[in-house]
């Protein structure tokens, strides 16, 4: 199968669909342990234990004491004797508890473990994690949220990736995600009133439990829904944390390390499987199905955006590809595995730093340079009878008029300025070619014996596609239109 070319408004529509799918799935994750019927579930009991353990941490006047006080204050907003209230406050509480660990409040061993969850290259503020707070932001009366108050700089590798993969430009790789993972591991180590001496050998196991039980998804969902970070930024942070959690040297040696932007189940260190029966697994599989439906069984790769063509006298529209997704038994698509592809974006950005080897380039790197790295994997379409695929370097030279001419000459087969028309055509072609995509597109089984977030006791059957009840729709509208 070949890629579908979309251009003009269809590219922005594709970004919007991706954002909508991310928000929908994260909303359901956040709702899972607190929605109707969740009381008494295994997931709710796990949250109850986390809250009780959190509240029992003794106050201190030592290192990081101000962060521990702020964490407990946020915890009171999240949980009080009348039940759970401000669900987003748990993200604030875990972030502050993570800062407490980073300051050495719980000892050097926990401080070192929290620091070790952050990839040294990706979190380097002088080179790769490049953002700047917007001047006079406090006087603008905008929300105190990451993507509103920060501007990503041209040298940000994550900005380069977000331009190519399509989610909104966020606030760079999420340190709060790894800090929250360390905080959850710290809380799990103190379950049932235990106050053990910090044991570095047990810390990765507690972090693994927080990921596998779905707890680490909680702060991720909170940040995505509040627009602190994009899902890509949180997923990338967890992917880079995987070597420290699972005790191996490479990012790509675990499902989490190979986290794919189109497979949510990697966030609980699994590969997607049709027989994933625990509630959090079913929610994430449903998210995979949503993404698959939004793009007609394909994946988005943007090869020219408005940053590329700013002030260009000829190029007048954005261009993207809807790339065929792999079907079992085909191997996974490395192109969309964030942690393993980060070095390629970093290197491609570096190679563009000089023009003709002598002059420093100003501004953002070109998306074409990134796309050329993957040109053989994109399945570019032909543009005429008995011709080979169009070269990327030729495709991105075209303006909207020329792209419409391709569309007319090929009877609309591969070029679309309407996302609805493109996804309808590609879904029909995909179904005819190889049948429906299995849930999540996965090929392997996964363990299901963990007490997952929101797991009832026992678990009733639940149809994944119909989660958006009228009540949840109202909640989503309130969230997106405060």
Image: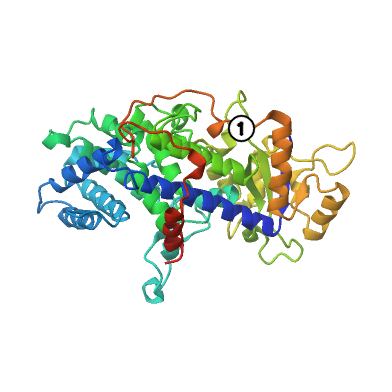
- Percent of width and height locating residue 25: 46, 46
- In the rendered structure, the answer to whether residue 159 lies left or right of residue 311 reads left
Q: In the rendered view, would you say 177 is above or below 400?
A: above
The image quarter in which residue 47 lies: top left
Q: Which residue is mark 1?
A: 437
Quadrant placement of the N terminus: top right
Can the viewer see residue 228 in this picture? no
Q: Look at the numbered disc 1 and give the secondary structure of its residue.
A: loop
- 152 sits left or right of 423 in the view: left
Residue 247 drawn at (x, y percent): 34, 27
- The image quadrant that residue 205 belongs to is top left
State the image coordinates of residue 462 (x, y, percent, origin top left): 44, 37
Query: Residue drawn 45% across and 65% down?
Result: 481
Find residue 264 and report its horizontal and vertical position in percent: 47, 39
State the quadrant of the C terminus: bottom left
Q: Quadrant of residue 310?
A: bottom right
Count all numbered tags in the image, as a single digit: 1
């Amino acid at each position: 199968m070949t890629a579908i070319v979309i251009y003009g408004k269809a590219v922005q529509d594709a970004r919007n669909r991706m954002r909508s799918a991310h928000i929908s799935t994260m909303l359901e994750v956040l709702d899972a342990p607190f929605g109707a019927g969740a009381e008494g579930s295994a997931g709710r009991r796990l949250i109850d234990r986390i809250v009780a353990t959190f509240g029992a941490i003794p106050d201190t006047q030592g290192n990081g004491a101000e962060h521990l006080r702020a964490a407990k204050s946020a915890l009171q907003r999240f949980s009080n004797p009348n039940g759970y209230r401000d669900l987003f406050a748990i993200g604030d509480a875990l972030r502050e508890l993570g800062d407490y660990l980073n300051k050495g409040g719980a000892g050097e061993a926990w401080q070192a473990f929290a620091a070790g969850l952050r990839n040294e290259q990706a979190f380097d503020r002088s080179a790769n994690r490049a953002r700047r707070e917007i001047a006079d932001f406090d006087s603008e009366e905008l929300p105190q949220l990451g993507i509103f108050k920060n501007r990503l700089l041209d040298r940000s590798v994550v900005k380069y990736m977000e331009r190519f993969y399509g989610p909104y430009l966020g606030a760079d790789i999420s340190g709060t995600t790894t800090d929250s993972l360390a905080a959850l591991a710290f809380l799990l180590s103190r379950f049932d009133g235990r106050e053990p001496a910090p044991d570095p050998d047990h810390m990765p196991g507690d972090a693994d439990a927080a990921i596998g039980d779905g707890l680490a998804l909680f702060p991720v969902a909170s940040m995505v829904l509040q627009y602190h970070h994009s899902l890509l930024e949180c997923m990338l942070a967890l992917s880079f944390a995987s070597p420290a959690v699972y005790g191996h040297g490479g990012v790509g040696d675990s499902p989490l390390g190979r986290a794919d932007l189109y497979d949510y189940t990697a966030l609980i260190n699994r590969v997607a499987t049709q027989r994933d029966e625990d509630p959090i697994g079913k929610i994430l599989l449903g998210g995979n199905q949503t993404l698959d439906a939004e793009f007609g069984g394909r994946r988005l790769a943007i090869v020219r955006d408005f940053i590329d063509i700013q002030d260009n006298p000829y190029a007048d529209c954005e261009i993207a590809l809807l790339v065929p997704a792999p079907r079992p038994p085909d191997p996974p698509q490395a192109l969309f595995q964030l942690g393993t592809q980060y070095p390629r974006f970093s290197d491609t950005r570096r190679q563009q730093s000089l023009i003709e080897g002598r002059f420093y380039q100003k501004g953002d790197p070109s998306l074409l340079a990134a796309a050329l790295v993957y040109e053989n994997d994109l399945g570019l379409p032909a543009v005429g009878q008995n011709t080979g695929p169009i070269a990327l370097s030729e495709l991105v030279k075209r303006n909207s008029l020329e792209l419409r001419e391709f569309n007319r000459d090929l009877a609309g087969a591969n070029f679309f300025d309407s996302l609805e028309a493109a996804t309808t055509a590609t879904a029909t072609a995909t179904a005819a070619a190889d049948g429906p995509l299995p849930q999540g597109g996965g090929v392997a089984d996964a363990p299901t014996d963990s007490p997952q977030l929101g797991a009832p006791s026992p678990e009733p059957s639940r149809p994944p596609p119909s989660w958006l009840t009228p009540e949840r729709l109202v909640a989503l509208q309130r969230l997106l239109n405060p």
